[in-house]
Image (spheres, grey):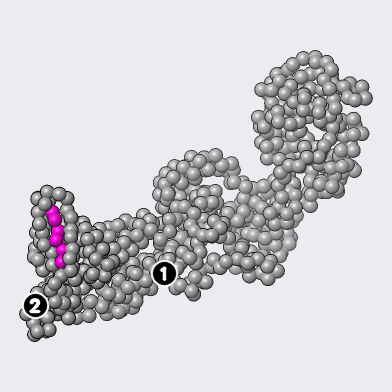
Amino acid sequence: TTPWTLPANMAIALNEQLTYIDGEFKNDEGVTQRLVIAKELIEKFSLATNLTLTEKHSEIKGNQFSNSITQHPFISRASPVIFANFVTTETGTGAVHIAPGHGGDDYLAGKEAGLDILSPVDDLGNYTEEVGIPELVGNHVLRSNELIIDMLNSKKALLGKEEYEHSYPHCWRSKTPIIFRAVPQFFIAIDAFRKEALEEIDTVEWLPNKNRNRIYGTVESRPDWCISRQRTWGVPLPVFYQVDGSPIIDGDLSRQVAEILEKEGSNLWFEQDDSWWADKMNLPEGTSRCKDTLDVWIDSGSSHVAVCDRHPELSSPADLYLEATDQHRGWFQSSLMISMVTRGTAPYKSVLTHGFVVDQDTGKKVSKSDQANSKDKKKKKKVKPMEADHFVSKFGADILRLWVASVDWETEVPFGEGLFKQTSDTYRRIRNTLRILLGNLHDFDNKKDAIPYAKMSIIDQWILERLHQVTLECAKGYETFQFRKAYNAINNFCTNDLSSIYIDITKDRMYCDLPDAHKRRSTQTCMSKVFNDLCHLLAPILCYTADEAWEHAGHSPGDIHCALFPKPDPEHVPGNAIQKVDQLLSYRNLIQQSIEPLRQEKVIRSNYEASVQLSLAEGNATPEELLGSAEDVNEFFMLSSLSIITDQGGPTATTVKSTHPKCPRCWRLLESQHEYYLCPRCEKAIN
């Protein structure tokens, strides 16, 4: 044990399940002593002390020592025998010195046994008169170890001593050893509302839902909440003491103090002396004020009172509390406790817990203190920039927001410039999609040019059905805080459905058909709908980009953030068009595989130079049956021509270079009687 705690000994703890030997032990000088040692520890004890068991009187079960009394080795005080499960056979004698005033386990064991709590140490770590040994009074406890060992020697109570390396708590700021002492504190009695708090936990939505068990278990087993701190800074504890030292705990007095400090500032509590406060509060002369401060978790835990309850325009209870995984024992719990005490309900409807942000290269948790140290020239510590300002300046606020939306917040979140460069690429694809859609709508008036859904081409109906799906996915993602799902839905829609398929297929009709052609207006109708809804779907994440695009479309700045979130159009419920296009896309992939070798050999440079024969098994729907016309087939696959044959084998495709001339306007290779090889469609458009 640490010798300095021996003056505060109040008991000896044994393990009632161990067997103890009552016997005679002889040292190297032939001196014999009668000792009681745990049977399993006799060999280790002999090696440490050179005391050998020479005669065994009896074996005694630990529980038989109940109601036994021992004598303190150098103080005239009895120490009863108690029992504790933490007494083990790893080292020592099987008997543990108990000082309830200087250790958590000792305190709990002593409290259970009804021991007095003695802590004869002042705020400076010096022994007080209460220690009962004049030569120790005023000495610092950590500098008294040798003196106490000498006392044991003089009383012939020291059987052996040794130095050994062990883990010992140190102050995280000063790096100096900590001493534990029991001092009067103020507590919130958790048992007074524990049952109700546990019931409230089950009314809250916990995200991820596994965290419900985490906070439930913590609240279920937590002790009373110690809310007083012996610190020189913080919110004062509004308690006064009578002359005899008993505390005056009065709600009305606390409210009076709060009103004074709200006007004058909290420093007034410490700046004015006891007599000033006694006079101010109409308390008897000699009344003193408490010098303790409140636990900082009271500050954060009461934030809902200061914010939500004081502002009618805000929701109370709060819709969402958001913090990292360590806050189940911190802010989430302190907020719950304060709210249960003040109003009997949880302060939040939902609680979202995210993982720690970690450096993408090292995996080390990103720390605010590291960032602060990087600015301190004395620390000389180089730290990669992790502050939002750096990334906003370098990449822009929307890319920072897009990165946040893209991460899986349920786990640790990698963070670094490389990830922001990847996010920048995604952002550019989304922005470019908006730009193309907007560019294709320059001559479109939705009021007079729109085409009804039923009269649209299959590819147009397909993109609206996909938009219906994406809108549902985004709405669900936003509603459940699964922003990554909304991000993925939008990114896939822009990259795969729009850029790679829809915009690619329809660009021929957009650029080469007559301005008022039915198919062109059909696509513009779709693009207008997609652009408008996509801006709204993006607005919660890319707030500046969505607003910019919305403004370029002819709307007023900021309007998009005042508009209602889009609802899926019931006319566009996924069904026929998606089924047809899924089949067509499987044919498209087959055709592309057939074209690619010729492209690699530079026989052809684009799909428009390809003449493809598609072989299908009997019963398979042909592209023309799915699309309605040969012209639509060539447009969908972007080919010069496509012929179909029936074969009993699986679908296959073969490609040769078309022999038709190239239309100089649309670049497709088609039959032409025109002197400049314009195809019939382009000749009509020009005429």
Q: Secondary structure at mark 2?
A: loop
Residue 110: say if magenta: no
Residue beneath disc 1: 424
Q: Main secondary structure of the magenta part?
A: strand
Q: Please state if 565 lies on the left or on the right of 231 as rendered.
A: left
Residue 633's image quarter? bottom left
Residue 48's image quarter? top right
In the rendered structure, which amino acid carries the disc numbered 1? Answer: Ser
Along the line of sight, which residue is nearer the eye, 344 or 280?
Answer: 344
User: Residue 303 location in percent, x, y?
Assistant: 52, 59
Q: Which residues are magenta?
A: 611-616
Name which residue lies at 71% across and 52% down: 171
Along the line of sight, which residue is nearer the eye, 157 or 468?
Answer: 468
Residue 483's image quarter? bottom left
Name which residue lies at 46% across and 46% down: 211
Residue 614: say if magenta: yes
In the rendered structure, which amino acid carries the disc numbered 2? Answer: Ser
Residue beneath disc 2: 672
Above or below, comparing residue 476 to residue 629 in the picture: above
Where is the N terminus found, in terms of image quarters? top right
